[in-house]
Amino acid sequence: MLHRTKSVVCLIAVIFAVALALNAAPAWALQDVRQDVPPWVVGGIPGVPVGYCHMKFPAIDEKTLGTDDPRLQRPESGNIIDFYGPCNHDPLGAEEVQRQMNENQRQRDDE
């Protein structure tokens, strides 16, 4: 009987330790100490693993949208993209260019 009690206590201790470790994981996971984060990254997203960020960056200038050389508008324009996603998201990358072109088309269709 004593042997069984010790086994149950050990099992409970292991389960407790694992549960504690899993609950502590987000705290250290959100500490992104990368030095190469672009200036438009606002920060990590609470509760989401490292690698996902909150970014704010100017929209792509419509004159350069869809060209081989897209350029961001000046920040003073006030046309700011509020992005939540991978930290390696490129504000001038093909994915963002296509997303903004689709959004511009939707706005023209609504008018």
Image: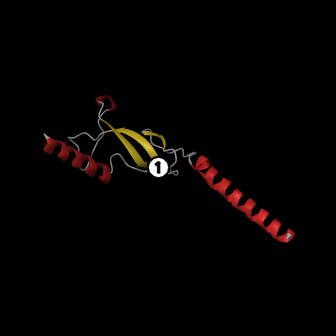
Q: Nearer the viewer, residue 7 or 19?
A: 7
Q: Is residue 41 visible?
A: yes
Residue 103 place in picture, x, y as percent: 23, 46
The crowding category of the residue bearing disc 1, from other C-alpha atoms within 10 Å (few below 14, some 14 to 19, many at least 20), is some
Residue 6 place in picture, x, y as percent: 82, 66
Residue 40 place in picture, x, y as percent: 42, 39
Q: Nearer the viewer, residue 3 or 85?
A: 3
Left or right: 35, with 57 as reference point: right
Give the residue drawn at x 28%, y 30%.
77
Provide the residue designation for mark 1: 52
Left or right: 3, with 23 as reference point: right
Left or right: 78, with 42 as reference point: left
Q: Is residue 66 visible?
A: no
Q: Is residue 10 above or below residue 65?
A: below
Q: Nearer the viewer, residue 39 or 28?
A: 28
Residue 94 place in picture, x, y as percent: 30, 53
Which residue type does callout 1 highlight? Answer: Tyr
